[in-house]
Amino acid sequence: MFFLGIPTAIGTNFLQALGWAVLNSLWQMAFLWVIFQVILSFGINKPSAKSKLATSFIKHGLCMVHVYIDLSLVH
């Protein structure tokens, strides 16, 4: 059976993995935000340093989502 050109079983597995990845990314990004705020509390006032730090945390957060989706689809 097909749904929007995707076999139903594959589409269901992908959507389930995507849903769990989004759910897990919420607490992971909240955790990264807390760490970011703790680091900033040590007195980082330079805008370029704040920007680089924030960018690295966002990249790490997105990588965690990607890895979780990949690992969920393997099983």
Image (cartoon, helix red, strand yellow):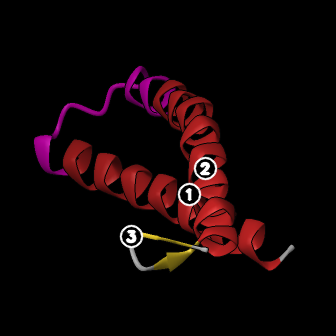
* 63 w.r.t. 40: above or below: below
Residue type at numbered disc 3:
Leu
Task: State left or right for residue 32 relative to residue 54.
Answer: right
Number of numbered labels in the structure image? 3
Quarter of the N terminus within the rendering: bottom right
Q: Which residues are magenta?
A: 36-48
Residue 26 lies in the magenta stretch:
no
Q: Secondary structure at mark 3?
A: loop
* 1 w.r.t. 25: above or below: below
Q: Nearer the viewer, residue 28 or 14?
A: 14
In front: label 3 or label 2: 3
In front: label 1 or label 3: 3
How far apart marks 3 and 2 lie (CA) works out to 22 Å
Residue 4 - label:
3
Q: Are marks 2 and 1 in contact (CB under 8 Å)?
A: yes
Q: Secondary structure at mark 2?
A: helix
Residue holding disc 1: 65
Residue type at numbered disc 2:
Ala
Residue placed at 12% from the left, 41% from the top?
Answer: 47
Crowd rating for badge 3 (residues with CA inside 10 Å; few <14, some 14–19, many 20+):
few
Residue type at numbered disc 1:
Val
**At which x and y percent is residue 9?**
70, 70
Quarter of the C terminus within the rendering: bottom right
